[in-house]
Image: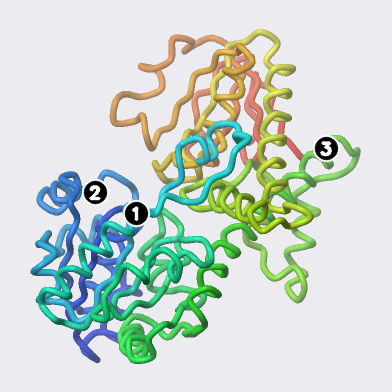
């Protein structure tokens, strides 16, 4: 876009660095592309054959704003760890720290709790550190991965040599808008362990943006990152509780209630995540709440706030299933939307898949369709055995595509987002709008 070109011209040419990425997955590659578009020379390492295929074919299998356009003209190549160390001035480490699938948010919360899996991150950092030691080269190494407070000092730093100048710099990004969020962040959160490394990183970031550079301890930065994500989950859980309340109270509408609160920007903070709908999803929010609920139990907190956020998400989904069971009245059930948020094909932590799984748990069969996931394999008419018959549709993801969806006559449409217009011949139930 014209804005991107202006920004690139403004920042590029000030300082050119050789920037390495130890990992080019769904976080690393878009950020690497963003760094490259600012004029830096980027080199990457990733052991996954699928990442090499993406760079070779120039075809991104997931949806990211700007990413495909910049991938088309990118010069990023997969190199060895040895070459990564030889040619880099600074190395970012965006290696995954996954939770098990049972903690992702698409199934019920299990009774047990677990920390994140740090094995991939530890393996990657020790491999990088070994090469730094071999080359006797000091390097500013910036970890991006989400970890719980205390992890880096306890589990990672003791494994590294003096050549790794470690910093902790988790990003506040959302899948689908990773490049934009990286280039235009609210703040740059920076956990400092080595002052010189932090200075070098700060110098680098001034070529990317002029966002506030918030320096703190590594432990504070670890906590700030997961607190940020779980606060978003708190906002969503809160407004969805009000949505359920409005559905039962006469002359109330959750959008009107929240529109008032959104205007209260001195105490409520902002209008983001203050719209009724379904629970939060994605690769961060559900799992970070689960991880902090585990940490709360480990620390012996009197009240596990984070556990209750996740329970609210699950109980609210059960309430939506109750509504589907009641309103469907024997009609076939179709959930429209699989992805965890609009206009993306990522299903990690998807609340609509959680809804589907709870329906199935109750012995109710349902069909799922998402144009961002299923469209390459055929349109809705080709996929649905119920095409042309009345159905109970539930809008699981707020894709604008569903506004003009070919709903069958005499169907029931349950819309927790309140954006589907009246459809002739159909009953539209807008959850939370009881005016």
Task: Please report the residue visible at 56 percent of the width from the left and 68 percent of the height from the top.
Answer: 223
Which is in the foreground here, disc 3 or disc 1? 1
Q: Quadrant of residue 169?
A: bottom left
- Residue furthest to the right in view is 250
Q: Specify the quadrant of the image occupied by residue 72.
A: bottom left
Q: Determine the residue positioned at 24% across, 91% down.
A: 14
Q: Residue at x 20, y 71 (%)?
A: 20
Q: First in sequence, mark 3 or 1: give its number.
A: 1
- How far apart are labels 2 and 3 at the CA level? 43 Å
Q: Residue at x 50, y 35 (%)?
A: 102
Q: Quadrant of the C terminus?
A: top right
Instruction: Measuring from the top left, give residue 207's x and y in whole percent.
Output: 31, 85
Name the element at disc 3.
loop
Q: Which mark is residue 64?
A: 1
Q: Where does label 2 land, which residue? A: 60
Q: State the image coordinates of residue 324 (x, y, percent, origin top left).
A: 68, 22
For mark 3, what is the residue?
434
Whether residue 384 sits left or right of residue 392 in the image: it is left
In the rendered image, residue 367, in percent from the top left (x then y), is placed at 49, 19
Q: Are marks 2 and 1 in contact (CB under 8 Å)?
A: yes
């Amino acid at each position: 876009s014209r804005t991107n070109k202006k920004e690139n011209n403004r920042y590029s040419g000030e300082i050119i660095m050789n920037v390495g990425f130890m990992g080019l997955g769904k976080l690393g590659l878009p950020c690497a592309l963003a760094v490259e578009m600012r004029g830096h020379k980027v080199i990457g390492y990733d052991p996954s054959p699928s990442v090499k295929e993406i760079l070779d074919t120039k075809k991104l299998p997931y949806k990211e704003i700007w990413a495909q356009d910049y991938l088309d003209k990118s010069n990023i190549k997969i190199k060895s760890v040895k070459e990564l160390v030889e040619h880099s001035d600074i190395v970012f480490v965006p290696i995954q720290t996954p939770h098990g699938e049972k903690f992702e948010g698409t199934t019920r919360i299990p009774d047990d709790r677990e920390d994140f899996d740090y094995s991939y991150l530890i393996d990657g950092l020790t491999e990088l550190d070994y090469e730094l030691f071999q080359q006797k080269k000091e390097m500013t190494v910036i970890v991006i991965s989400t970890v719980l407070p205390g992890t880096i000092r306890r589990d990672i730093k003791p494994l590294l040599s003096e050549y790794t100048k470690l910093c902790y710099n988790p990003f506040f990004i959302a899948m689908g808008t990773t490049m934009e969020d990286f280039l235009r962040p609210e703040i740059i959160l920076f956990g400092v362990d080595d002052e010189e490394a932090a200075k070098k990183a700060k110098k680098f970031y001034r070529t990317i943006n002029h966002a506030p550079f918030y320096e703190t301890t590594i432990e504070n930065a670890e906590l700030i990152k997961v607190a940020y994500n779980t606060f978003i989950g708190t906002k969503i859980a809160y407004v969805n509780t009000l949505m359920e309340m409005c559905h039962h109270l006469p002359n109330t509408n959750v959008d009107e209630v929240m529109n008032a609160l959104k205007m209260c920007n001195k105490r409520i903070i902002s209008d983001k995540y203050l719209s009724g709908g379904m629970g939060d999803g994605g690769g961060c929010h559900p799992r970070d709440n689960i991880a902090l609920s585990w940490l709360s139990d480990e620390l012996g907190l009197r009240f596990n706030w984070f556990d209750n956020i996740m329970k609210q998400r699950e109980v609210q989904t059960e309430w939506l299933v109750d509504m589907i069971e009641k309103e469907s009245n024997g009609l076939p059930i179709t959930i429209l939307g699989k992805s965890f948020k609009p206009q993306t094909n990522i299903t990690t932590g998807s609340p609509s898949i959680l809804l589907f799984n709870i329906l199935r748990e109750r012995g109710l069969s349902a069909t799922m369709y998402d144009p961002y996931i299923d469209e390459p394999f055929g349109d809705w008419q080709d996929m649905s055995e119920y095409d042309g018959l009345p159905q109970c549709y539930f809008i699981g993801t707020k894709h604008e595509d569903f506004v003009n969806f070919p709903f069958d006559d005499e169907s029931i449409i349950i819309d927790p987002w309140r954006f589907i217009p009246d459809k002739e011949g159909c009953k539209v139930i807008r959850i939370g709008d009881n005016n």
